[in-house]
Structures are given as C-alpha cells and as structure tokens.
Amino acid sequence: MTVGPPIDDTEALANTIGLYALGEISLGKAAERSDTTRWEMAEFLSEVGVEVRLGPQSVEDLEDEIEAALEID
C-alpha cells in the first residue's frame, strides 16, 4: 500500500511530482508543496517510480533546501 503526502488535490500532487521528476523543483520544495517531510516525500516518490535525487543539483536547489530547512518549526 502506497501512502502519499496529505494533499487533497490530486492535480496539485501530480503537478508537484511532475515538476520534481523534470528537475524543476528540489525534493525540499516538493515536500513543502505537499505539506510533508523530505523523507516522507522521498519515500513516496520512490514508491511511485520517480528517481529520487539526493542533494541539491544547482545553486537554486541549494537555496530552496536552505529556505525549507529554515521554515521547520
């Protein structure tokens, strides 16, 4: 059984997965958009067959990761 992020809007989740798969957003940004942790998002992406990229792929990805980390309560 696959447990996904708590997004009620299937289209928004599909959009987030697509953006991540295309390399348009980082794992941290995908998790933020999905209201879940990076670890949960990585597990979910792996379960649905999307290759998980670990670590920032660009300076913009690094900035997204830092921003997401600073927002953790």
Image: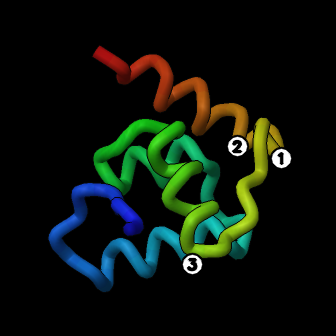
Q: Spot the residue most to the left.
A: 8
Q: Amino acid at mark 3?
A: Gly
Task: Read off the residue under disc 3.
Answer: 18
Left or right position of 16 against 62: left
Up the image or down, 4 lies above or below 11; here it is above
Q: Position of residue 15 (x, y in %)?
A: 44, 78
- Ranked by sequence position, the earlier of labels 2 and 3 is 3
Q: Amino acid at mark 2?
A: Asp
Up the image or down, 18 lies above or below 23; here it is below
Give the quadrant of the N terminus.
bottom left
Task: Read off the residue under disc 2.
Answer: 61
Quarter-of-image position of residue 66: top right
Quarter-of-image position of residue 56: top right
* Mark 1 crowd level (few <14, some 14–19, many ≥20, 10 Å Cα): few
Q: Residue at x 63, y 61 (%)?
A: 46
Q: Position of residue 51 (x, y in %)?
A: 75, 64
Find numbered disc 2 in the image and state the secondary structure of the residue it sits on.
helix
Q: Amino acid at mark 1?
A: Gln
In front: 63, or 73?
A: 73
Q: Position of residue 22 (x, y in %)?
A: 71, 75
Tag on residue 17?
A: none
- Ranked by sequence position, the earlier of labels 1 and 3 is 3
Give the mark toward the camera: 2 or 3.
Answer: 3
Up the image or down, 10 lies above or below 60; here it is below
CB-based contact (under 8 Å), mark 1 and mark 2: yes
* Mark 2 crowd level (few <14, some 14–19, many ≥20, 10 Å Cα): some
Task: Read off the residue under disc 1.
Answer: 57
Left or right position of 37 against 66: left
